[in-house]
Amino acid sequence: MAWTRGGSFRGSRGASFAQILKKNICAPPGLAVAYVSPAVSEVNNNLFDPACNTNCGGIRSKSIPQELIDRYKRGETHAVSALYQLSQVLQFQVELKETVTTGIIPGFYFAFCVVIDGVKYKTGMGINKKEARASAAQLALEDLLPTLDGDSLLPEALDGPPPLPVKESQSTGSEIHPRRAIYERQNPINEHVSQAVRELLSKLMDSYPEFSACKSTVAAFITQSPSGCEVVAIGTGNYNTKESATPNGRVLHDSHAVVTARRSLMRYLYRHLLLFFSKNRSLEEKSMFQQDKNTKLLSLKSNITLHLYMNQMPKGAAQIPSNLRLNPLSISAWEVNNQISLHVTVEGKVFSVFSPTFDQAASRVVSMSASDKITQWQVLGFQGALLSHFTEPIYVSSILVGDVSCCDVRGMEIAVNQRVDGITPRLPMYYCVYRPHISLVPTACPEGGANTNAQWSHGINWSQGDVSLEVVDGLEGKTVEASPFKSGPALASRLCKAAMLSRFNLVAQKASRRDLLATVSYREAKMMAKPYQEAKSVLRSYLAQQGYGSWVAKPPVSDHFSM
């Protein structure tokens, strides 16, 4: 049974979505979840069919990905990547934890151990953290792979991951939002991120109080290193453009906070690429990148991790209602399918790709929802196609949500992790589903602040190294006249595609990449990133095959421009 697109119902969709919602979300290692209201616990219990409740806990029974194992044994896949890829396919939780060196060892060494579903494996050591992680992963695989011999299956287990740990809270935790779940990770960055984002916003806005209403929806990227955590990119906004696609690359199509923050992050990454390729040793050492001697690709230094903060749940599937249930007395499976399908935004409004309302808006420029874009970035990397010419995929280690109205992150778990379960073996080398730790943290904007009529569609952007912030009208896709930073009289944003292509050409020149400098258009430069394009094609095909709908691409004309 199949209806046409636009209120369509495809017979294969219901089962795959139902299977996802019948699973309880497994908390990451080290994550304790305290629910301060019995109502939330009751909702979780109602998510399961009675017959399914007997099968809770453990690793799902699946066929062993022999090709993945063979690639690792041939040295084509790094030990850490192989371990994470196995965790995606076989559905177990894996964590690399820093520990102490064992025995009497002269000199200074770093030590890590792999923890799989709470079980610690042998300690690996190295002269730096990257080497120690690799050693720990190799030792864990030495013990793990023999148990996956041939076509055997993991020990007979269950249809879903272990149930979410639930315990009664000693206190309400928040008198204003008594139903909110309190996430307590043993990760020091959670304690500092909200404060760091709040302090940066205050610093930026102190000089420009007239734009203080632009910070109602905030996203930021934070790096963590031995020197502490630092906000390196920030974006606000809640709209995408009403303008038609243009062939000059100077209009921002999507100005939602997390998209703006991610493009600000890309500007920050370009700065560090210029430092690395500066041919100046002291400047190169200041870069956040290190180079693989074999592939020549860059990656973040082993002691640097990247994190994403948002003060609101992103639009789309991540906003699935906490009380959404699948049982005969609840809402229909068709409604559930629309909740966790792919979504698009049109001038700030959100539609399922299966919605007939979306068909009516098809003539206008649309953007995929923020939830779907985060899902894509956690597979393809936050660096995008152009930067992938120089770097391995760059993933965030954690997603921190400071939304005071949220009681759990179940929707984010479904959108970012569960919808792409099983895709890793199909992806090219270096790409995988990198599962971030998702948790609730204090909000960075407790005072809120509704936008004035004049600023309701405005958003700001900033990245480390910028002298001032830029204010963009999301509906127009261009900088506003009163913006502290303006690139020129045309008011093209510093985040637009043309600006990114200019930075790309500068890095290609510094890196002596004549092949990249020979490209004649933005689109050609993107399409030359073949592994990235292959991974993108695999991801979108997989999402469609699983019944989530088709990814809506922007008109190609928006990429056909050159500098």
Image (cartoon, rainbow, N blue to C red):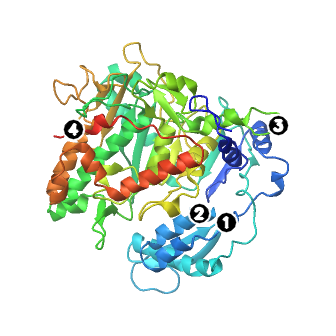
> Could you tell which of marks 3 and 2 lies nearer the N-terminus?
2
Question: Which residue in the protein does label 4 denote?
Answer: 561
Asked whether disc 3 touches disc 2, contact meaning CB atoms under 8 Å apart, the reply is no
Task: Determine which quarter of the picture holds residue 256.
Answer: top left
Task: Determine which quarter of the picture holds residue 203.
Answer: top left
> Could you tell which of marks 4 and 3 lies nearer the N-terminus?
3
Local SS, label 3: loop
Q: Amino acid at mark 3?
A: Pro
Q: Residue at x 68, y 32 (%)?
A: 335
Question: Which residue in the protein does label 2 denote?
Answer: 89
- From the viewer's perspective, is 555 left or right of 104? left
Question: Which residue in the protein does label 3 denote?
Answer: 328
Q: Which mark is residue 62?
A: 1
- Report x, y in % for residue 153: 69, 72
Q: Amino acid at mark 4?
A: Phe
The residues bearing labels 4 and 3 have C-alpha atoms spaced at a distance of 53 Å
Local SS, label 1: loop
- Report x, y in % for residue 186: 57, 56
> Could you tell which of marks 2 and 4 lies nearer the N-terminus?
2
> Could you tell which of marks 4 and 1 lies nearer the N-terminus?
1
